[in-house]
Amino acid sequence: MKQTNLEMTHNHLKSIVMAIAMIICIQNANAQFANSFGKQKSGKQHPVRVYFMAYDMQYPGIAIGPEYDFLYATHQKIQCNKGTRYTDKHLYFVPQFGIVKTDVQSVAAFVNIELDFKTIYQSGFIVDLFASAGYAQIFENQPADLGASSFENSLFASHGAFFPQFGIGTGYDFRREFNTPIQVNFRVLSASVDMKEFIKPGLNLGITYNL
């Protein structure tokens, strides 16, 4: 049954309020983590990531967020034939926000919380496993009806969706060999705003910089 403009407006405002509430929660969490509760186990390092996304292997997107390792971090020292080798392991808590094109006619603005278990070897080689849950507000660019602007149609056609992501990645930490506070990461993941297609392949290419 077709929704009236009033019903669509109500649903749209409800979704906007949910998105704003989640953003406020993330900002409050960031404030808490910046204080005693979120003290970095790795000291004064404050990594911030910028990840570019290929949603469904073809549509572009971007996500930005800080990395906090207050949950778990360890520095392991291993003796082997080649001498002493060091391995770092971190469980990062990552609040992120971003925007991604989900198909030919739709764009989604999203916020999520990611848990990223990252292992950094002596050589600088990185292996990470990650999963996240989030909320996406999807704006559909539908053909304009008579007497209505395309902006209004896009506004009315917007809706909220659950946006989970999970996958595995690799990368390189330049601090190991070059003392440069930069990591590059490449990740293969599943990310979908449609629960009927929960497994939808995608790619991440990103940079993490320690402030």
Image (spheres, grey):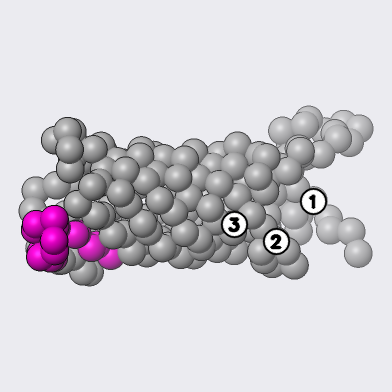
Where in the figure is residue 29, as x and y percent of width and height?
A: 28, 60
User: Are dots 1 and 3 in contact, CB under 8 Å?
Assistant: no
Q: Secondary structure at mark 1?
A: helix
Q: Amino acid at mark 2?
A: Asp
In the rendered image, which residue does mark 2 sit on?
A: 194
Is the N terminus in the top left, top right, bottom left or bottom right quadrant? Answer: bottom right
Q: Nearer the viewer, residue 121 or 89?
A: 121
Residue beneath the point at 59% across and 42% down: 54
Q: Which residue is mark 1?
A: 5
Q: Is residue 194 left or right of residue 124?
A: right
Residue mark closest to the camera, 2 vs 1: 2
Residue 99: x and y, percent?
54, 41
The crowd level at tag 1 (other Cα within 10 Å; few <14, some 14-19, many 20+) is few
Any magenta on residue 211? no
Query: Closer to the observer: label 1 or label 3?
Result: 3
Question: Where does the magenta region start and end?
Answer: 76-92
The residue shown at (54%, 42%) is 53
User: Quadrant of residue 164 in the image?
Assistant: bottom right
Please check the rendered image and state whether residue 81 is part of the magenta-colored stretch, yes or no: yes
Q: Is residue 14 visible?
A: no
Tell me the tag on residue 191.
Answer: 3
Q: Is residue 131 left or right of residue 201?
A: left
- Residue shown at the point (14%, 47%) measured from the top left: 45
Residue type at mark 3? Ala
Marks 1 and 3 sit apart, C-alpha to C-alpha, by 31 Å
